Amino acid sequence: MARRPQPARSLAVQVLRQLEQREGFSNRHLDEALDGPRGQALERRDRALATSLVYGVLRHRGRLDALIDAVARNPSRLRGRIREVLRVATFELRELDRPPHVAISEAQAATRALDRTGRLGRATQALLSELVRRGAELDRVHEDGPPLEALERRWSIPPWLARRWLESLGPARALARARALSVPCSVDLRVDLSRTTRADVLAALEAARCEAPESCALADGRVVPQPQLLRVRAGGRLARHPLHARGLFSIQALGSQQAVRALDPRPGERALDVCAGMGTKTLQLAEHMRRRGALVATELSEARLAAHEAMCSRGQLDEAVRAGALTLTRRVADMADETAVPEVDDGPGYDRVLLDAPCTGLGNLARHPEARWTARPGDVEECAALQRRLLARCWSRVRPGGRLVYAVCSLEPEEGAAVVEAFAGARDDVTVLEQQRWTPEEHACDGFYLAALARAPA
């Protein structure tokens, strides 16, 4: 009887096929699969393997296809599920430290289910055996080629984006960014310093056998002064850790943590969180405000805003509300619309406004690698147009003397500095206090841009 493929690899292929057919966020598809019957039956190491395979194939898909096509007799016939099986096996051969025969035999087992004659299994063995012999050589050829070819074939940057980067960054910087985005992300944690210390959280994580260095080092060895940050490189499913359940730390990328730090909300102030998503930054705002003041969160997606209920409980915001120290209002709203929003625009202007604007997410290609293959050239200008409308509407809600932070998880100029500088240049009540760019190649983190704007006093 033919051997069945190992379940972790089968699950990875299943998730990759779903992403190619339906798109969506890789982490959500993967979580659904791991929480389903097949995923729950996996041992911990197999869950880790499936996760590594999904994210690894998505990060390296252009490179994997270039390798497969270089040795295949008829690449155009390798489509659908067989292409995903070959991508998984090629990723294992080139990136994971295990004997080549394991990846080859698993791929053969997977292809036998697609072709009972055995011809596909033999062709798979021949193709992958050739990659064992020539994979390193082909990678070097692709890496040493012209910059556009290297970005596409070695570092898996889609051609349209590679051309943008070469034009705006130059070859050296574009290649450095692509290399930085090709490796697995660390998991960054934000410690709630209003209720605990970083040292206590670090000790608890180390007791749970998490790799958690105390600081984040830049590429040149300097240390980022981030008192709330812990960077975890291996820790299992941190969302199930007891300290996370109590809200003493949250999972949030380093760059994303900077927006609220730049906004610097104070206890007793009135703050507005626009495009609040599932509430990560809403909770961060409350932490900075010591859970005292008025906090309003808006989100276009009702499903995302529903997640705020769990966030409020986890972060003990509901207790602060019951005690009368904090008022918390959540509204489903299109904040780019010209009309006033009930419960958002009923009172005075806001001391602090956070606009974490919808964007292409092109700074997140390591953490959300599916964006490499779902983003389109027109997305940049489409997002920029929405960002300009949102910034103008949100600015009208800032009181004189107040502050707004505009943030995007993209490093494309049209979505960042171009939006802010055009807006500030057209008004006489705007002062740009600072602009920050967090880049993968400089800070070993997601790409992130923010600008802090102050409104002139009355």
Image (tube, helix red, strand yellow):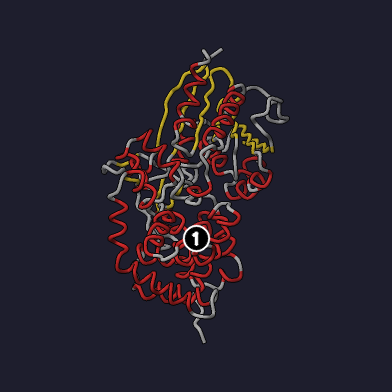
Residue 63 position (above or below residue 3): above
Q: Is residue 338 left or right of residue 422?
A: right
The picture places residue 1, in percent across and down from the top left corner, at 52, 87
Residue 318 appears in the rendering: yes
Q: Residue 168's x, y, as percent?
A: 38, 33
The residue to which callout 1 is attached is: 237
405 or 337, nearer to the observer: 337
On the question of residue 199 being in view, the answer is no
Furthest residue toward right: 342
Vertical comparison of 86 with 303: above or below? below
Q: Residue at 35% across / 39% down in the picture? A: 225
For the point 52% across and 58% down, which residue is it?
A: 242
Number of residue marks: 1
Badge 1 amino acid: Arg
| Label 1 residue SS | loop
Please state which of residues 241 and 379 is positioned toward the viewer in this rendering.
Answer: 379
